[in-house]
Amino acid sequence: MISATNVSRWYGQVIGLNDITCEIGPGITALLGMNGAGKTTLIRLITGQLRPTTGDLRVFGEEPFANTNVYRRLGYCPEIDNFYEHYSGRDFVRFLARLDGLSSTEAKTRTEQVLEMVGMADRAGKRIAGYSKGMRQRIKLAQAMLHNPDIIVLDEPLNGLDPVGRREFIDILGALAEQGKAILVSSHILFEVEQMTRSLLLLHRGRLLATGDLGVIRSLIDKHPHQIRIETVEPRKAAALLASLPNIVSMKFDRLGESIQLEVREPDSFYDALQTAVLEQGLEVRGISSPDNNLESVFKYLVEA
Amino acid sequence: MAASPIADLSYRNYDGPLDPPVNRWWAIAKMSMKLSTKKRGFWVWASMSAYWYLILLAIFYFMDQSAQATTALGQQNPLFKAIEWKGQFINAFSVSQLFMFILALMLGAGTIANDNRANALLVYLSKPCSKLDYVIGKWLGIFIPMTLVVGAPTLVFYFYCLLSYRSYGFVSQDPWLIVRLCGMVLIPGFFHASASLGISSLFQQGRLAGATYAGFYFFGLFFTKAMQVIVSVDNMNAINGNGPGAPTIVKNLYYCSVDGIQEALAKIFLNTDGSPLLPIQGPGGLQRVGIVSQPSGWVFIPAFFAICGLFMLLAWSRIRAVEVVG
Amino acid sequence: MIIASVNNLVVRYGRFTALNGLSCEIPEGCTGLLGPNGAGKTTLLKTILGFVKPTSGTATIMGMDIIEAGTAIRQKVGLMPEQDCHIPGMTAVQFVAYAGELAGMPASQALRRSHEVLDYCGLGEARYRNVETYSTGMKQRIKLAQALVHGPKLLLLDEPTNGLDPAGREDMLELVRSVSHGKGLNVLVSSHLLPDIERVCDRVIVVMKGQLRAQGTIKDLKKIEGRPIDVELREVCPAFVAGMQATGANVMLPKRTTYRIQMAGLPEEAAKVAMQVAKDTGAQIRGFVQAERSLEDAFMDAISTSGPPPVAAADGGNS
């Protein structure tokens, strides 16, 4: 639905995006990167606020800049927090619904639907000036969903939400994704992103660092072999039994003598060997885990490379 | 414990000496002054505010020189004989008022407003620093620089005249002049500090606070100028025998503005009605038409302190740690 | 030792009751303060600092009463607020030294200490630049520095990783962890990001609707009854499930390829049993860990139960 081909955008001398080529389809995609990596620039390009300096960005096959055809099917939930503070939440959303082109009655019903979906139906009567951060985020999502867009772009949507609110928000996004919409979420809170999706788009200093499934990306990071941690009361014995495997890169004993941490290439054969060690060679094992098989580690490895 | 050759540079606690609470407001005042005097504009306006004294010095010098040629030996310089010295100080004071106001905007408009916007009050109030310390510190941070800017040229001019024009009645006109002057120079700082704090605490942006104060100021200015015109006309009529002089109420209204009330107190402290702007014109007659006599001390001194007090109360009530919606 | 003791604290803003009879004890060490939005976390912090006066109830911080000894308390407490709070027009060194002077340090000591604390917080040459030019990460460090400069014994952190990217978040959490463990500084962290709290704190206090909901060590809160084990396979394998059930274990399927299994016996024996079943059914075990509730789940459970607030299991009263 969104496709970028060699897209670059710079501001004077400062580079925002440098030669990005990617595709974003239905489902939730996470847009990750350090501060200043170009996430906001990419979002602005997709939502049609900027034009790429070079390259070709197409949303639904058309250029999104000042293109009402695209806007009609795109919803945007920005990071900034500016509203008409004296409006109530309900009035604000209804006002935007009217701006979307809905008739007065349609706007009213749609507003109620959308407020119900984000869980603000009972609290939307109060003025926005008195809202907490979480309530503001929900109103922002509500206005993004009004015209039932096919793409929703969210910039730091989970900021300021308490854990309950975050869960609900993620559920809403999940439900929307299942309807076939493309949801692009930009966030720093990696453990939340992990719960939402495994499909990533990672930017670093304006360049595209990685895109695709988390698991696939992890397995391709050659420089950092998989870390596997085995908890056992006999770490030295474990070391002795496993050291002969060719795909073990390093072994570390922890200070308390309760576990051994290994770095392994091609973990598949390793796990089989481990099974043999436990069943046939009498290794006593309490726990097996992979400490770096999560988004945060993958992010760190990719960025520091 | 044997001393290790490698120093431990990790975090350590602070167990050093602590100053008693009385120094907190001084720290705040010092910082306010440091921040404001760093601005270049401060020095420009501060030095320009004393320009009337320079003009007076030039006028007196030429009066002195020209009179020497025409006065007979042993006689006093007739031009100088007619000068009311206190009036000169009042005039210089009045002329500097606009500059003082600009300085007040520079020093004071942003004080609390900027802290509001930057949530700096959280820092102040989360330390063992009370609201009183904060208010006193900010107040002094405006009062002290302004008083110095008003006081330095005044005192320099006073001592110059003391040394040069004693024979012309400088001291004999009022031996307590120096004491009165010391009181007079405190007035602008006192008023502007209080008013700036009060108005600044209402806003989140220094610019809005400044604009409000400026609106307040200029509105009063036009009002008092109008009153002055009425007084002039009435006095003119009185001189021509066409009616009584200006009524007291108009005279009092003349003093009802930011500049006016400071002028009122200055006149009261110096115990004078003021003089024509150019000292060459003697007292009495047409030259005094535009001069408004000093108002009643019983009314204006309490009014002055009441207004300053109100502003400070306003500031006090508006200062609180920022509400966090959570 | 108890750092803070709160007894039936009631705080009202006009008609809105923010704290409704909150009673809790904060021990030494690093404690997390959790709760949904509007539960009263920020109000509790503000009451400790003396920004708001309680309607009723008492609280003592390090033995000092909050109403009578407000100034003395603030001498020993440092606050790192959630919002940006720097004073415009100053450099970092000036700002932190100023904060020290406000806390009563003599000017020379304040400057010296300011440099020391900025070293600790990892701010290099940038400390001589105007604070307004800083990035979010640097601003957070200055906030922490101004809270530490006067050597407090209790540090209050409100969303310390707000706005930080993953690298910045890790640095900040490392800082907080190192200052709280081994330096004698007690820390109270209020945050919505539960993994951050998990990383830094040992205990948590859960507040909801102005009352205490739960408190205890994180380990205790995350324990699951019966101590089941999460077994992760390479791929989904129903035969494995059947095999495990045949050995008498109780199998549940939480997520994709991970099965939560209740087995009898020590973990080592359970591992052997599981490995055997895996070998027999052609599955490959890639993970074998004691199942824990995530802190988030524990938190959700704590706030969703209705009725009288449950207080979590035995923590012995000492940290």
Image: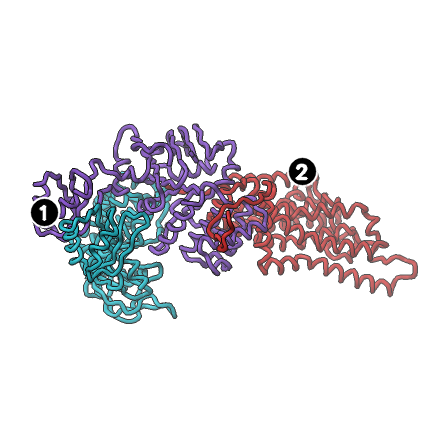
Residue lying at 26% horizontally and 43% vertically, measured from the top left: C294
- The reply to whether dot 2 and dot 1 touch (C-beta < 8 Å) is no
Q: Which chain is red?
A: B
Q: Residue furthest right?
A: B74
Q: Quadrant of the C terminus of chain B?
A: top left
Labelled disc at residue B299:
2
Q: Which chain is cyan?
A: A
Whole-percent x, y for residue B91 in the image:
71, 53
Whole-percent x, y for residue A281 in the image:
16, 51
Question: Which residue is identified by label 1?
Answer: C240
Q: Is residue B286 left or right of residue A75?
A: right
Mark 2: amino acid: Val
Residue lying at 21% horizontally and 49% vertically, measured from the top left: A288
Whole-percent x, y for residue C181 in the image:
40, 45
**For the residue labelled by badge 2, is the local secondary structure a helix, a strand or a loop?**
helix
Please, is residue C251 above or below residue A78 in the view? Answer: above
| Residue A250 visible somewhere in the drawing | yes
State the residue in front, C273 or C310. Answer: C273
State the residue in front, B24 or C264. Answer: C264
Q: Colour of chain C?
A: purple
Instruction: Write down the chain letter for disc 1.
Output: C
Q: Are discs 2 and 1 both within one chain? A: no
State the residue in front, C84 or B168. Answer: C84
Question: Which callout, 2 or 1, points to the residue nearer the camera?
Answer: 1
Q: Is residue A74 left or right of residue C123?
A: left
